[in-house]
Image (cartoon, rainbow, N blue to C red):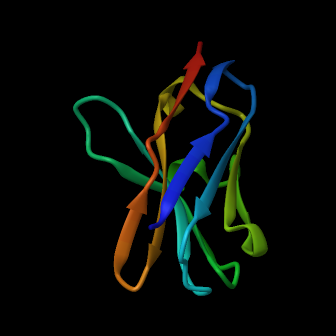
Amino acid sequence: QVQVEESGGGLVQAGGSLRLSCVASGSILSFNVMGWYRQVPGKERELVASITTYGSTNYVDSVKGRFTISRENGKNTVYLQMNSLRPEDTAVYYCKLRFTLKDYWGQGTQVTVSS
């Protein structure tokens, strides 16, 4: 049984910062990909950033230079440091763990950026 749990969302003013955390537990292969996605009502869920076990990262263009993804492999934990937040970053942020072609999602955490 694999579980994924996010934390760290909240309300912040434009220009501010937040750090999201995600912890995965259960039987997890050592090689995996962890990522952050976000979704707003009426739109599809989009990839924000991802990171492999070896530290290879990928970001959506709109967050490059503002967000940083990192992980602690021994703790199956991934972080998303979000700086210079904008109102358009407002969304529910989801953590996803992927290995052996299976995806495991967290329940999501709300991030709201006020203008």
Residue 5 higher or lower than 109, as above or below: below
Q: Quadrant of residue 115?
A: top right
Quarter in which the N terminus is drawn: bottom left
Spot occupied by residue 28 in the image (x, y as percentages of width and height): 55, 78
- Image: 43 above or below 115: below
x and y percent of residue 57 in the render? 62, 72
Which residue is nearer to you in this view: 86 or 112? 112
Q: Is residue 59 visible?
A: no
Q: Residue at x 55, y 85 (%)?
A: 29
At 63% across and 24% down in the image, what residue appears? Answer: 10
Image coordinates for residue 41, horizontal then vertical, percent: 28, 29
In the image, farthest residue toward the front: 1
Residue sitting at x 59%, y 28%: 86
Q: Nearer the viewer, residue 97 or 63?
A: 97
Q: Quadrant of residue 58?
A: bottom right
Q: Which residue is pictured at 77% across the width and 74% down the height?
A: 74
* Residue 29, above or below 110: below
